[in-house]
Amino acid sequence: MKNLVVITGAGMSAESGMKTFRDNDGLWEEYNVMDVATPEAWHRDRELVNRFYNERRKQLYKCRPNAGHKGLAELQQDFNVNIITQNIDDLHERAGNKNVLHLHGELKKVRSTVDENLIYDLDGWELNIGDKCEKGSQLRPHIVWFGEAVPEMDNAIPIVHQADIIAIIGTSLAVYPAAGLVHYAPDDCPIYLIDPKIPNTHINNVNYIQKGSGEGVSILKEKLKEIL
């Protein structure tokens, strides 16, 4: 089977009700992203940062995969599908997608503040100040904050390099290093970009599908039938 690599961003989950901050001048509801998504913010006000992610987690439990997530899962019947997502939700997995790499972490997981290799599934939506890892340190959200390294890039690059087809869904390709992933694609690899707004990017071999994730993935499936 051909290798279909899908790179997804916030627009992928917007139709499921997950709120984003880039559509509102750097605000995530009433929060400034720099106050809740940086290491400095965590050191300055753990209560605020922790409350913010508890709220995001609680919201996630109310969301469901949309038609776009489900459509990508259905493509696994005909393609070797690998999803590289900038999203921290688990909607791809809940839709049945098997190979999902989270570049920016996972909302339903927490990790040690002294050993980044100690990662735990969180039971429920609430992390409390005082919850500690096995080494006795405070647990933090398992999220890549602004200013932190993106360790999963080392795993994402080889996946893109082996792609036969690439689909980009719901991302402006404005956040690096994730935005640079597409440049690792083979030169002759066709690229489909699904988004209601066409981003100002310079990518070769791009086929634009100017729709939301649900409708866009449906159109993508029809186009990919021609490749089978």
Image (cartoon, grey):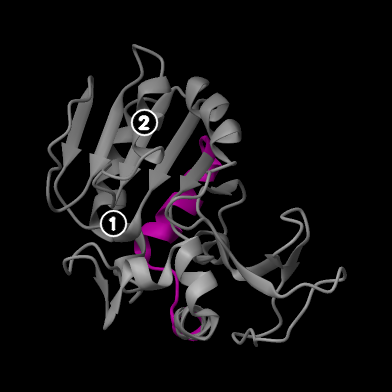
Determine the image quadrant of residue 94: bottom right
Is any part of residue 1 visible from this angle? no
200 w.r.t. 218: above or below = above
Dot 2 amino acid type: Gly
Q: Quadrant of the N terminus?
A: top right
The magenta region covers 58-81
Q: Earlier in the sequence, mark 2 or mark 1?
A: 2
Q: Position of residue 20 (x, y in %)?
A: 30, 68
Report x, y in % for residue 88.
Answer: 49, 62
Q: Is residue 108 above or below residue 212?
A: below
Q: CA distance from mark 2 to mark 1?
A: 21 Å
Left or right of 115, for residue 206: left
Of the numbered discs in the image, which one, if any, rests on residue 191?
A: none
Seen as rendered, the residue at the extreme right is 134
Amino acid type for the residue under numbered disc 1: Ser
Name the residue at 44% across, 58% down: 87
Q: Could you tell me how many numbered marks the image carries?
A: 2
Crowding near the residue tagged with mark 1, few <14, some 14–19, many ≥20 C-alpha atoms within 10 Å = many
Closest to the camera, between mark 2 and mark 1, is 2
Farthest residue in the top direction?
187
Q: Write down the residue under mark 2.
A: 180
